[in-house]
Amino acid sequence: MTTLVAAEAAASPSGQPIVRLATPADDAYIDDLQAIAFGPGRFARTAFRVRERFPIDPTLSLVAEIDGTTCGSVWMTPISVGGLKGYLLGPLATHPNFRKRGAGKLLAREVSKLALSRGEGHFVLLVGDQDYYCPLGWVPTVPGNIQFPGPVDPTRVLLLADDKSLAQSLKGPIASFDQGQ
Ligand SMILES: CC(C)(COP(=O)(O)OP(=O)(O)OC[C@H]1O[C@@H](n2cnc3c(N)ncnc32)[C@H](O)[C@@H]1OP(=O)(O)O)[C@@H](O)C(=O)NCCC(=O)NCCS
């Protein structure tokens, strides 16, 4: 009886997002989601140019689910800046039907925790809204210090790192992960 009740509880909708690693079976969904979230202009974005040069790490590709339905995605690109290894987060997207339920923030938090727990990269960089990311721990960098392969609004270049001085000191062009320590 107790087992049955537990099983029913597990199967009943909670409405809460969870995250899991993406698999190749998620590729088409993620492609469609990014098209919905960013539109045709996504290929012109500066962050897209970084991902053209340096591949994403598929083992850091997470998706969100709510009640068994896939509803969000985040990618990570291993990079280095000024000789220091780290990651560029993005794109982060949630399906419009599942927004404001915590999936976006959960994805950003969990993928950063997973990447930094590997002990190789020192920071998670992104280009995004301060109002969204700063409450999660990201802080503004020094405008112009981190050079992207295209134009970015310098006030949107944000950094998450255990070393709180890094947002002030990190400087240089975005390079490959291999060029960092
Ligand atoms: C941004 C995005 C990922 C948020 O996804 P989400 O699953 O709704 O996020 P959460 O549920 O974790 O957080 C929602 C909260 O963030 C707020 N929020 C959403 N986008 C925001 C933004 N750009 N700036 C500030 N706050 C924002 C919402 O108003 C909401 O606030 P509330 O909790 O007070 O109601 C989603 O709206 C999206 O895919 N947008 C299009 C693509 C995009 O802009 N990606 C981010 C690129 S940096």
Image (cartoon, rainbow, N blue to C red):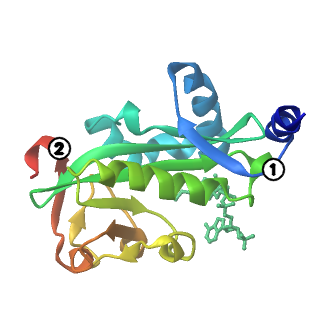
Secondary structure under the numbered disc 1 in the rendered image: loop
Vertical relation: 54 (above or below) 113: above
Query: Which residue type carries mark 1?
Result: Gly
Residue 133 rendering spot, x and y as whole percentages:
51, 69
> Can residue 175 be seen by looking at this rendering?
yes
Res 95 quadrant in image: top right
Give the crowd class for mark 1: few <14, some 14-19, many >=20 residues within 10 Å: few
Disc 2 marks a residue whose amino acid type is Ser
- In the displayed structure image, the side of residue 124 where residue 147 appears, left or right: left
Mark 2 closeness class: few <14, some 14–19, many ≥20 residues within 10 Å: many
- 181 to the left or right of 173: left
Query: Quadrant where the N terminus lies?
Result: top right
Do the numbered discs 1 and 2 sit on residues whose CB atoms are within 8 Å? no
* Mark in the foreground, 1 or 2: 1
Q: Nearer the viewer, residue 98 or 115?
A: 115
* SS for dot 2: strand
In the rendered structure, find residue 15 and report the number of the disc placed on it.
Answer: 1
Q: Mark 1 or mark 2, which has the lower sequence index?
A: 1
Q: Is residue 71 above or below residue 137?
A: above
Residue 149, horizontal then vertical, whole percent: 27, 52
Q: CA distance from mark 1 to mark 2?
A: 39 Å
Quick check: which quadrant has ligand 1?
bottom right
In this image, 131 relative to 78: left or right?
Answer: right
What residue is at 58 percent from the left and 30 percent from the top?
Answer: 31
Residue 81 spot, x, y in % from top left: 17, 58
Q: Mark 2 — residue?
A: 176
On whether ligand 1 comes within 8 Å of the CB at mark 1, the answer is no
The relative height of residue 32 versus residue 167 in the rendered view (above or below) is above
Residue name at image x 23 percent, y 66 percent: 146
Q: Where is residue 120? Give x, y as percent.
A: 20, 49
Considering depth in this image, is 47 or 14 the residue closer to the camera?
14
